[in-house]
Structure formats: structure tokens, C-alpha cells
Image (cartoon, rainbow, N blue to C red):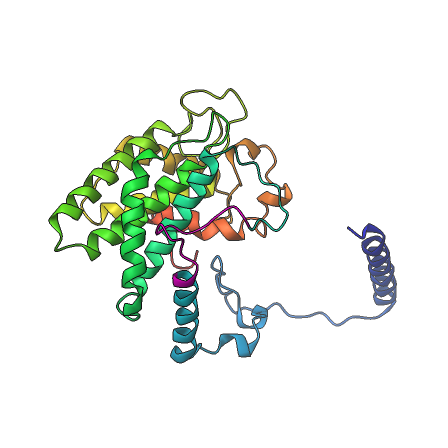
């Protein structure tokens, strides 16, 4: 942080303000009549035209052909980088980053989450890009075989909650895709029920979910709820509920309550409940919440929170 630059700028601004105030005090000012026009109520998240700083060229709708071309590149990438066993992802290209990942469980969790996301994306693209079929079939087979064995890496790393959540989203789409396949429908139903059980087992003591437990390493995680993890699971719960699979009600209600405890007045969210006494910590400011704000908002909207409006 270049603090000296900000200090110099701040000093300059203060001097200019003092000069302006001094000069204005010596001038004879004409009283300005107060306007009687009613002020327009400012709604949250809606800037007035004069405060709308989005460049005009960024407000032009993207042509459908450009969107289709982008989707095609994404489909080609996923098909080209699928592992031979049908999964996606590996731990061989880390860019030199050191991420806490106890083996082998952490890698199992990341691979399950990555594969589930890829399956979901390709199923959504299959009607437009039928070349996805073989990759989806392989991915579904891998997920059905491996998902029942997904667990946390150890008492500290609970990355498996990502795998359970994203697997539920994939299973919801697999349920639609395999509507005429009764044996697969039965397998999907069993896997959905198992994910409900796993997410109940790994629920944080205060409700919701986190991905670390550096407190006590208890059977039921003693860590705080992390807002965006809870949001991810709640969205997954909604996806499967739309297909007739009802998630455990008390678990769902506790997750909603956990997110609400982390909600700020501007509808941004704390990173995790453990930071509730540091609301202006950089990670808890609106900018730090950008990636999780709408995830939390849509999760709350799905589960009945009426204060989440279109303006939000």
C-alpha cells in the first residue's frame, strides 16, 4: 500500500478545501431558494442516471453468435481435458501455489467437485452441442461409482462439502437427462439421499458449513459457518428439491439462519461467522464480498427470504 501517496493527496485536498472555504467566506452570496420538488426515493442497488458510471459500450447486449462461440470454446475445452476415467481435474498444475490439502482426501474432494461442475455444464450444453454425449456418459459413470466413498480428508480439512454440494447439482441435471432410464433414476435417488446424510454429518455446530476445522477437530465440525459454502449447499438443496427430493428441513433452516447472521445491511456478507466482530475487515467489505454476495442472496431467495428483491 502506497500510504505516502494517499497522505500527500489527502493533504492537498484539505489545503484546497481550506482555501475555497476562506475565499467563499469573503464573498457575498445570494440566498438559494429551496426546491419544493419531492426527492426521488433511492432504491438499494439502483444508481441514478447521473451516477451510473458503466460505460455505454459495456451496456450493449452481447450478440448471440458471440455467446455461442464462447460456449463452444468451453465445451471443447472440457471434452479435451477430461481424464481417461471420466473425471476432470488433477493436482499436477498448481502454478507453484501451496494449498493446504491433506492427501488423499483433499484431492478426492476437489476432483469430485470439479467433475460435478463439468457434468452440470455439459448437460446444459448437450442440446446445442450433441458432441458432449460421450463425455457426459463417462463423467456420470465416474461420479456414480466414486461419490459414495467421498469423505473429509481428516479432522481439519472438510473440502468434501464442496464435492457433496456440487454433486447434488449434477445429480439434479442427471435426473432430467436420464428420465427414461429407471435403473439410473434409482441410483440417482440413492446418491441424493446419501449426500443429504453426508451434509448433515458434516454440518457445522452452529449450522451451515465450513471447509476447515482448526478448533477441536470434532466428529461434527466445530468450525464456523462460511457464508458462501452454506449458500452453495442451499442452492444445491433447491436444485434437487425441484425434482422431488426434499432436503432435511432442520439442516436447511439452520443454514439459512447462519447466512442471515452474516448478512450486512447492504446485502453483502461476511466471509465467515468467525469474523463477525470485524465487519470492516477488508475481506468483509462490499468489494471483498463481490464473489459471494449474489450466491448468498439467491440462496436466501430460494428458501423464502422475501427481503431479497430484484433490486438487491
Identify the image quadrant of the C terminus.
bottom left
The answer to whether residue 197 is above or below residue 239 is above
Going 32% across and 32% down the picture, which residue do you hit? Answer: 198
Taking the image as drawn, is residue 307 in sight?
A: no
Left or right of 34, for residue 203: left
Left or right of 75, for residue 55: right
Looking at the rendering, the stretch of residues picked out in magenta corresponds to: 79-92
| Residue 257 picture location, percent across and down | 39, 35
Going 39% across and 66% down the picture, which residue do you hit? Answer: 75
Q: Nearer the viewer, residue 217 or 10?
A: 217
| Residue 163 picture location, percent across and down | 39, 41
Residue at the front extreme of this rendering = 84
| Residue 24 picture location, percent across and down | 83, 66
The answer to whether residue 236 is above or below residue 14 is above
Q: Nearer the viewer, residue 179 or 89?
A: 89
Q: Main secondary structure of the magenta part?
A: loop
| Residue 164 picture location, percent across and down | 35, 40
Left or right of 235, for residue 77: right
Magenta stretch contains residue 139: no
Magenta stretch contains residue 86: yes
Taking the image as drawn, is residue 88 in sight?
A: yes
Q: Nearer the viewer, residue 190 or 301?
A: 190
Amino acid at each position: 500500500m502506497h500510504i505516502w501517496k494517499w497522505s500527500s493527496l489527502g493533504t492537498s485536498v484539505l489545503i484546497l478545501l481550506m482555501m475555497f472555504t476562506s475565499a467563499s467566506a469573503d464573498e457575498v452570496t445570494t440566498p438559494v431558494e429551496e426546491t419544493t420538488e419531492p426527492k426521488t426515493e433511492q432504491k438499494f442497488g439502483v444508481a441514478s442516471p447521473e451516477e451510473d458510471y458503466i460505460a455505454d459500450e459495456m451496456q450493449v447486449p452481447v450478440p448471440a453468435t458471440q455467446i455461442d462461440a464462447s460456449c463452444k470454446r468451453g465445451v471443447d475445452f472440457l471434452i479435451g481435458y477430461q481424464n481417461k476415467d471420466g473425471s476432470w481435474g488433477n493436482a499436477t498444475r498448481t502454478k507453484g501455489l501451496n494449498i493446504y490439502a491433506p492427501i488423499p482426501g483433499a484431492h478426492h474432494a476437489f476432483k469430485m467437485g470439479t467433475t460435478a461442475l463439468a457434468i452440470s455444464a455439459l448437460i446444459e450444453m448437450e442440446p446445442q452441442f450433441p458432441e458432449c454425449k460421450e463425455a457426459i456418459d463417462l463423467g456420470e459413470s465416474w461420479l456414480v461409482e466414486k461419490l459414495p466413498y467421498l469423505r473429509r480428508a481428516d479432522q481439519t480439512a472438510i473440502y468434501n462439502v464442496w464435492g457433496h454440494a456440487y454433486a447434488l447439482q449434477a445429480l439434479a441435471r442427471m435426473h432430467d437427462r436420464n428420465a427414461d432410464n429407471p435403473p439410473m433414476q434409482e441410483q440417482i435417488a440413492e446418491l441424493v439421499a446419501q449426500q443429504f446424510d453426508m451434509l448433515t454429518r458434516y454440518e457445522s455446530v452452529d449450522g451451515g458449513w465450513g471447509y476447515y476445522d482448526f478448533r477441536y477437530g470434532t466428529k461434527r465440525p466445530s468450525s464456523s459457518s462460511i457464508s458462501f459454502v452454506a449458500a452453495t449447499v442451499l442452492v444445491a438443496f433447491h436444485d434437487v428439491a425441484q425434482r422431488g427430493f426434499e432436503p432435511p428441513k432442520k439442516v436447511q433452516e439452520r443454514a439459512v439462519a447462519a447466512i442471515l447472521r452474516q448478512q450486512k445491511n447492504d446485502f453483502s456478507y461476511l466471509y465467515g461467522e468467525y469474523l463477525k466482530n470485524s465487519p470492516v475487515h477488508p475481506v468483509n467489505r462490499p468489494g471483498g464480498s463481490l464473489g459471494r454476495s449474489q450466491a448468498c442472496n439467491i440462496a436466501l431467495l430460494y428458501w423464502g427470504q422475501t427481503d431479497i428483491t430484484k433490486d438487491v
